[in-house]
Image (cartoon, helix red, strand yellow):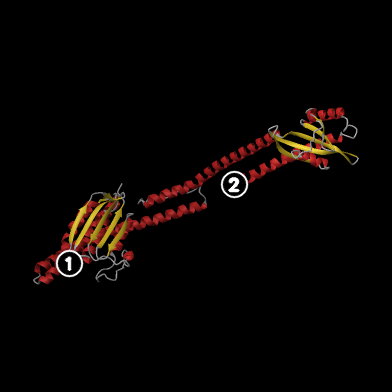
């Protein structure tokens, strides 16, 4: 479009100027031809002069008038109505130029005729003596119409060229983008979990696109092998861990039964409890591995997750002098049940450890998403530590020793793994609320 405008406008302006110049030159030549036929003998002979201007007007298709050296009208092809009138006026500047010996021509609007005219005047001279001037006027409407038609024709050609260019561009862009669209679709399917998705043949998009497709397929192959290896490792490791865990639990139960020292018995019971926790984690890993292999849709009712978390942590919370309260509003969230359980375990572990007292765990809906939240009434988190509490291995300055600084980091990573977010709000002296927002399951 820029090219068409850059070429079309100068071409149209040049056409208009050229047409006007040609008409002016032609009018000057014709007026000079009439002036050459007027001499000192007939400038003062009205009858001969009238015949001359009438013939010239009929031949040239315009109005021809003759004035003497003083600017007085002496002949008019339109009739003798204005003879002896002073014709050298400000409205007719061409007469003044001609009476000064200079041919003059211009296009101007005629109030009487209602359209543009070409007014041309040349001096009438004989042997160096100025006898008067000849003025030729005629309409240039036909010329304007011709220029306008040519301009419209150029515009139509430009529009046609633009439309043809757009059609060609759309066709070419479609042929070039088709392989990229196929690659984008393969990437989306791969991101959604279809590890068998491949770009395939990328011919038609150029060498660079073909190389991109080949690189994508190689990456997808490596990713599929890596994920399968990880899944097999998780499944195998989880299965293999069950045997030593069962043996360990049996040994601990035997040791608890034989223990006579009360303090030793409590330690053994605590160890037995941790073995149970580890067994639960292994069982969840096995369930997760099976669901991944079967391609099951990962979703969980957040209300049920809260109920399970309360059941798991109620006894432990009491041991840590905490009162656990659950409010579970139902709703299906797009997250693996094992991951959500681990998120809640980490949040409850932190709350009951560092903020003993009333701890609330709840679920609900917010702005079209689902959430689970754990809120305590502890001392809160220092504002300088708040931006970094979800970083790995970060521990605040006022936090008691004993933790690893990984609980909130793991919870955040698990939430982000499913497109969720983990938000921490805390006020010193009032408590902390940690909320995990998750997408609703389809």
Helix, strand or loop for disc 1: helix
Q: Where 52 sits versus 93, above or below?
A: above
**Image quadrant assignment for residue 164:** top right
x and y percentages locating residue 204 in the rendered image: 51, 47
Residue at label 1?
Answer: 271
The residue at 22%/54% (across/down) is 306
Circle nearer the N terminus (2, 1): 2
Residue at label 2?
Answer: 2
Q: Nearer the viewer, residue 120 or 158?
A: 120
Pick the quarter of the image with the N terminus: top right
Q: From the image, state whether disc 2 or disc 1 is nearer to you.
A: 2
Q: Residues within 10 Å of mark 2 (few under 14, many from 20)?
A: few
x and y percentages locating residue 344 in the rendered image: 24, 58
Q: Residues within 10 Å of mark 1 (few under 14, many from 20)?
A: some
Answer left or right for 84 relative to 278: right
x and y percentages locating residue 230 in the rendered image: 32, 59
The residue at 76%/40% (across/down) is 93
**Image quadrant assignment for residue 59:** top right
Q: Nearer the viewer, residue 77 or 68?
A: 68
The residue at 82%/28% (across/down) is 55
Residue 207 appearing in the image: yes
**Residue most extreme to the front:** 85
Q: CA distance from mark 2 to mark 1?
A: 80 Å
Which label was assigned to residue 137? none
């Amino acid at each position: 479009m820029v090219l068409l405008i850059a070429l079309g406008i100068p071409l149209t302006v040049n056409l208009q100027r050229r047409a006007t110049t040609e008409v002016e030159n032609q009018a000057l030549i014709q007026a000079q031809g009439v002036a050459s036929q007027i001499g000192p003998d007939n400038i003062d002979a009205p009858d001969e002069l009238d015949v001359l201007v009438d013939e010239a007007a009929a031949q040239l298709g315009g109005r021809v008038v003759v004035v003497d050296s003083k600017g007085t009208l002496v002949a008019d092809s339109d009739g003798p109505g204005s003879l002896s009138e002073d014709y050298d006026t400000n409205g007719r500047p061409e007469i003044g130029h001609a009476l000064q010996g200079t041919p003059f021509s211009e296009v101007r609007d005629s109030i009487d005729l209602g359209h543009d005219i070409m007014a041309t005047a040349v001096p009438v001279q004989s042997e160096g003596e100025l006898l008067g001037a000849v003025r030729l006027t005629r309409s240039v409407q036909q010329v304007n119409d011709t220029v306008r038609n040519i301009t419209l024709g150029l515009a139509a050609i430009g529009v046609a060229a633009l439309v043809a260019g757009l059609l060609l561009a759309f066709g070419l862009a479609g042929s070039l983008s088709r392989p990229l669209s196929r690659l984008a679709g393969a990437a989306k399917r791969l991101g959604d979990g279809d590890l068998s998705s491949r770009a395939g043949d990328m011919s038609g998009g150029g060498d660079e696109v073909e190389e991109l497709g080949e690189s994508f397929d190689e990456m997808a192959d490596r990713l599929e092998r890596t994920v399968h290896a990880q899944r097999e490792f998780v499944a195998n490791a989880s299965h293999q861990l069950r045997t030593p865990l069962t043996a360990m639990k049996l040994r601990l139960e035997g040791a608890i039964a034989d223990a006579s020292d009360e303090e030793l018995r409590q330690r053994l019971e605590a160890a037995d409890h941790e073995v149970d926790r580890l067994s639960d984690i292994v069982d969840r890993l096995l369930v997760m591995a099976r669901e991944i292999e079967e391609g099951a849709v990962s979703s969980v009712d957040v209300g049920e997750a809260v109920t399970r978390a309360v059941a798991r942590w109620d006894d432990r919370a009491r041991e840590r002098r905490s009162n656990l309260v659950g409010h579970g509003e139902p709703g299906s969230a797009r997250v693996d049940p094992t991951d959500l359980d681990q998120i809640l375990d980490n949040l409850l572990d932190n709350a009951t450890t560092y903020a003993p007292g009333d701890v609330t765990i709840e679920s609900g809906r917010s702005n079209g998403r689902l959430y689970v939240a754990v809120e305590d009434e502890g001392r809160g988190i220092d504002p300088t530590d708040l931006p970094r509490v979800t970083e790995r291995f970060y521990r605040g300055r006022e936090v008691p020793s004993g933790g690893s600084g990984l609980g909130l980091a793991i919870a955040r990573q698990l939430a982000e793994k499913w497109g969720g977010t983990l938000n921490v709000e805390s006020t010193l002296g009032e408590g902390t609320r940690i909320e995990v927002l998750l997408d609703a399951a389809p």
